[in-house]
Image: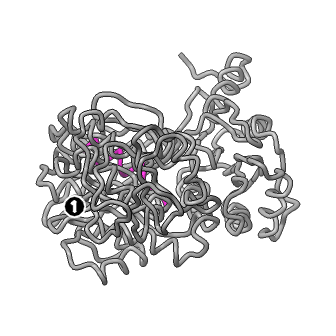
């Protein structure tokens, strides 16, 4: 769905008065405007639409007003006056106003929902799933929006973006209200915050998992990236609360300018909700969750300190909502796996295989350190880097894998319009021993090679694409799923008695 769709939630909307919604806007050609539908794509405008001139990185909607009018737009939301005769509403930022109008047309659904927003460089998807599971364990009906899909509590659809565009976002929230949801849990990406997709929303709770480095190709600098994450605090209701990771210095720095209630979680220092790891294997781990004077064990099929941190953030949200600690643990333990998030593939092979979404230096380091602790043999890592994305992280990724893995294979991720060889060279530029890396640009062949190198007791991690069931080469999206490639090879190897079968 584009920025210009007409969500079902708007069908019965009486429209909104822009002067009331945007009191500081300047109106030209009209004293007020009542809007029942809007469109941010001049090519898709219909009769009576409010045309929204959005300013993007490569295009400016203000340059396409003539087409919008020709297709029926009756008014325009702009940042500068257009040389046309239709009424215009002039605002400092059309993206902010766009989000506010979308929410208003949908009936301001966040007034009827307790919305939990989760942001951070790593862990957004898993933490959101954990929070939703805790709410379910406590008897609440909730919707969920994020990288793995959009769910209104009744139906689920594939996600186009981690955080939907403003019209789609408003529609899904309205569907949650109509379906009887009391809560909504959503991932809020840095792109969405920079583009004001959540404008007009009111969050009851916000969570920050960690803030490292990512998407510098979009944000331009680490400072801008961090400030985009900080923006989520401005959408918190006066009665709302924040949960932050006390082990992350950027997260804690956000609290210095935040005057509302906040809970801290952590494993390495002072925090209000903490954890103590007890034991960890390739298939599960157990830790003690400490909340005030209460301590309770948690046994989960997902491993790693990063997963414990995600669990602590989810538990903090549950505690803030007054959920019993035993229900919180039931919710945490109910999540056996999250697709592509250190997902264990088990087909009877005598070594471990994990598929993980790690595509940043920090995420790769976290994954490799976690798996090193549960691996007796060699740690084999297959990875790449996305094309047309942050190039600065590529040598850092190479250096990270060189330091933490025993064997490494570089392959294509989603190369898009970049030549895979260029990406490989930039990855290797950060390595001291580049000749020790294998390079196989064909991802399927690289996966087969990594699995073929594994011996009993080894661990293979296929990093970068995680849950994705496609690969983008040029302008084409081809069907490709790391997990299916792994399963096909492993099952075939078992059938050929390549591995010793366990005794009956």
| Residue 397 picture location, percent across and down | 68, 63
Q: Is residue 125 magenta?
A: yes
| Residue 302 vertical position relative to residue 350 in the rendered view, above or below | below
Residue 48 covered by magenta stretch: no
- Residue 255 image point, x, y percent: 30, 78
Residue under the point 72% across and 52% down: 384
Q: Is residue 266 visible?
A: no
x, y percent for residue 423: 79, 57
Q: Residue farthest to the right?
A: 435
Name the residue nearer the viewer: 408 or 49: 49
Viewer can see residue 298: yes
Q: Residue at x 39, y 68 (%)?
A: 91
Q: Position of residue 106 (x, y in %)?
A: 27, 43
Residue of label 1: 20
Query: Is 248 situated above or below 108?
Result: below
Q: What kind of secondary structure does the magenta stretch mostly adopt? A: helix
| Residue in front for this viewpoint, 197 or 222 | 197
Q: Residue 336, relative to residue 377: is it above or below? A: above
Tag 1, which secondary structure? Answer: helix
Q: Report the front residue among 400 and 143.
A: 143
Q: Residue furthest bottom?
A: 256
Q: Is residue 262 left or right of residue 311?
A: left
In magenta, the rendered stretch is: 121-134
């Amino acid at each position: 769905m584009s920025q210009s769709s007409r969500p079902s939630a708007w069908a019965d909307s009486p429209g909104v008065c822009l002067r009331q919604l945007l009191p500081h806007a300047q109106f030209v050609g009209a004293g007020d405007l009542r809007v029942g539908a809007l469109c941010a794509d001049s090519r898709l405008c219909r009769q009576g639409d409010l045309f929204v001139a959005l300013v993007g990185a490569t295009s400016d909607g203000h340059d396409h007003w003539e087409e919008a009018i020709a297709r029926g737009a009756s008014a325009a939301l702009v940042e500068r006056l257009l040389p046309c005769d239709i009424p215009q509403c002039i605002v400092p930022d059309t993206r902010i106003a766009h989000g506010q109008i979308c929410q208003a047309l949908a009936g301001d659904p966040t007034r009827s929902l307790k919305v939990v927003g989760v942001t951070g460089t790593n862990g957004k998807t898993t933490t959101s799933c954990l929070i939703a599971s805790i709410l379910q364990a406590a008897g609440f009906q909730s919707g969920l929006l994020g990288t793995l899909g959009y769910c209104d509590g009744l139906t689920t659809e594939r996600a186009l973006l981690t955080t939907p565009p403003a019209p789609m976002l408003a529609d899904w929230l309205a569907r949650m209200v109509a379906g009887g949801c009391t809560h909504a849990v959503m991932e809020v990406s840095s792109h969405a915050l920079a583009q004001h997709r959540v404008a007009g929303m009111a969050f009851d709770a916000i969570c920050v998992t960690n803030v490292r480095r990512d998407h510098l190709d979009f944000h331009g600098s680490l400072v801008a990236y961090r400030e985009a994450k900080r923006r989520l605090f401005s959408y918190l209701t006066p009665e709302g609360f924040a949960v932050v990771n006390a082990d992350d210095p950027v997260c804690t720095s956000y609290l210095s300018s935040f005057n509302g209630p906040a809970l801290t979680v952590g494993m390495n220092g002072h925090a209000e909700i903490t954890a103590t790891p007890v034991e960890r294997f390739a298939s599960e781990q157990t830790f003690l969750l400490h909340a005030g004077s209460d301590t309770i064990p948690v046994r989960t099929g997902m491993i790693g300190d990063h997963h414990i941190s995600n669990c602590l953030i989810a538990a903090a949200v549950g505690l803030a909502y007054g959920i019993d600690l035993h229900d919180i643990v039931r919710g945490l333990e109910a999540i056996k796996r999250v697709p592509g998030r250190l997902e264990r593939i088990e087909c009877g092979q005598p070594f471990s295989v994990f598929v993980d979404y790690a595509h940043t230096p920090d995420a790769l380091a976290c994954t490799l350190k976690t798996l090193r602790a549960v691996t007796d043999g060699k740690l084999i890592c297959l990875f790449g880097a996305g094309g047309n994305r942050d190039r600065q992280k590529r040598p850092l990724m190479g250096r990270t894998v060189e330091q933490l893995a025993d064997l490494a294979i570089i392959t294509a991720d989603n190369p898009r319009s970049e030549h895979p060889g260029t990406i490989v060279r930039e990855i290797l530029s950060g390595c001291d021993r580049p000749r020790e890396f294998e390079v196989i640009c064909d991802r399927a062949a690289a996966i087969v090679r990594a699995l073929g190198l594994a011996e009993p007791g080894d661990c293979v991690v296929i990093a970068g694409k995680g849950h994705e069931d496609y690969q983008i080469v040029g302008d084409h999206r081809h069907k490709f799923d790391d997990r299916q490639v792994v399963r096909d090879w492993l099952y075939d190897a078992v059938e050929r008695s390549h591995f010793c079968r366990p005794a009956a």
